[in-house]
Amino acid sequence: MDKRPPPEIRQGRAGRRSAAKPADPASARSVGATFRAAREWLGLSQQQVADLTAERGIRVSRSAVCDIERGCNMPGIESLVSLCEVLQLDPRGILESVLIGRDSAAELASCSASELRHRGLLLYVGGKYRAASRVYAVLGDQLARQTPSDPFEHLRLRARVECVRATSLRRCGQSYAAEAAARRALHLGLGFEGVQVEVLTLLASLHTDEALVPLAEAEIEQAVRIAEAAGSARLLRLVLSVQACLLFQSARMEDAIELFRRSTAYAIETGDAGSQSRSEGSIGICLAKLGHPSAARVRFRRALDLARRGHDGLCEANVQIAIGRMALLMEDLDEAEQRAAAALKVARGIENPLTTFSGMWLGHSVARRRKPHAPDRHRVSALRRLYASVANDKSAEAVREFRREVLGVQDA
C-alpha cells in the first residue's frame, strides 16, 4: 500500500508530483511576494528558511519555498503556518490578502499601470478602501513583472503602491494584511526617505491600534530621525500626528495637544487640508477629555468645516462621533443621537468598519440611557457582526466598551 504523501505539494517538474495551478495566479504571486520580502528582510536564504521549517517539525523544502515565492504554488495550511513562524508573519494576514483579492484579478488584468493608478486613487479618495486595496494589489503584481527603464524610480513606485495598499487595508479593517503590505513597502522602500517615514508611521499606527505601544514608540522614533534629517514639512507633519496619537493613548492629553498643534501648523504650511481637519478633530477630543467642552466644540467645528470642504467623509463621520460622545457625557441625549445618525449617514459611503461600529455603538449607548432595561437587540446583533472586523483595534473606546459591556471582557 502506498504511503500517504507529505503535506507539501509540488508543481510539475521532472520526477516530482504535480499539482493544479493556483485558482488565482495573482493571489499566488501576492503571497509569494510577501514571503520573499519577509525572507530578504530577515537576511535569510531559501535554504535557511527550509532548514528552519524542518526544526519546527513541518519541513518546507528549498525548492518548495522557491516555487511559493515565484507564485507557482500556494502553500498548504501546515506549510503556511511553518513558513509564517520562520518569517515572523501572521498567517491571518496571508489569508486576508487572498480573500480580498480573489474576485478582482480577472476584471483588472487588462488595465494598464496608469489606468490602475487612476482607478485606485479614485476609489481611495471616495472611501472605497477594500476595492482600492484590490486595485493596488493587481498594480503591485503588474509592476513586479515589468522590466523598467529606470530601476530606481520603478522601485520607489512599487514601494509607494504597497504603502497605499497597506493604508487602504488598514482603513477597511484588514489589519494583518495591512501589516504584511507595509512590511513589503518597507523592504522595497529602503533608501527612499519619504516612503520609509510613511511606512514606519503606518506600522506605528497599526501597533498603536493593537495596544503594542513599545513597538509603536520604537517605530515612530525611527521615523522621527529620518523626517528630521530630511527636513520635510510633510514628513514632520506625519510623524508628529502619530506621536500625538501615542501620547493620547497614554492619557498625556496636554502633550498630545501640543504635538497636534505643531502637526496642524505643518499641514497649513503644506496646504494639506485633510491632515489639518484630522488634527483639529484630535485636539477637540483631547480638550473634551480634559473637561473643556466649549474649547472642544470650537475645534470640532473647524474640523467639520475642513472635512466637508475637502469631501473627507471618514474625518467628518469621526468628528460627528466625537461630538456625540461628548454630548452623551453631558447627558444631552438628543444631540448624541443626532450626531450618531449623522455619522452613520456619512459612513454608508465609506468602507471603514471601525467608524460604522463606533457610530452604531454611540446610538446603542443613547438607547441604553433612554431605556436602561430595553435590550436593543437589533443594534447589538449588528454590532456583534461588525465586531470581527474591529476586534484587533484595542485603542478604540467604542470597541473597548463593547468588549466590556456586551462580551464581558476586561481589557488589560
Image (cartoon, rainbow, N blue to C red):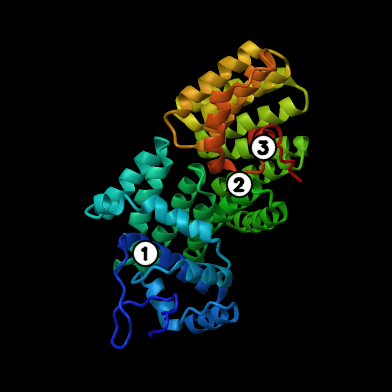
Dot 2 crowding, Cα within 10 Å, few <14, some 14–19, many 20+: some
Q: SS at mark 1? A: helix
Instruction: Find residue 217 and report its image quarter.
Output: bottom right
Q: How far is mark 2 from mark 3, CA to CA?
A: 15 Å
As displayed, is residue 72 above or below residue 392? Answer: below
Measured from the top left, where is residue 211 in percent x and y?
Answer: 69, 48
Relative horizontal placement of residue 293, taking residue 157 as reference (left or right): right
Q: Residue furthest bottom?
A: 15
Dot 1 crowding, Cα within 10 Å, few <14, some 14–19, many 20+: many
Q: Amino acid at mark 1?
A: Ala
Instruction: Find residue 259 and report its image quarter.
Output: top right
Q: Amino acid at mark 3?
A: Leu
Q: Amino acid at mark 2?
A: Asn
Q: Is residue 85 visible?
A: yes
The numbered disc on residue 1 is none
Measured from the top left, where is residue 346 in percent x and y?
Answer: 47, 25
As displayed, is residue 120 above or below residue 23? Answer: above
| Residue underneath mark 2 | 392
The front one of 281 and 86 is 86
Q: Earlier in the sequence, mark 1 or mark 3?
A: 1
The front one of 367 and 378 is 378
Q: Earlier in the sequence, mark 2 or mark 1?
A: 1
Nearer to us: label 2 or label 3 = 3
Measured from the top left, where is residue 84 in percent x and y?
Answer: 54, 67
The front one of 316 and 94 is 94
Q: SS at mark 2? A: loop
Q: Is residue 276 visible?
A: no
The numbered disc on residue 407 is 3
Q: How far is mark 1 from mark 3, CA to CA?
A: 37 Å
| Residue underneath mark 1 | 28
Q: Check the picture and name the quadrant holding the N terminus.
A: bottom left
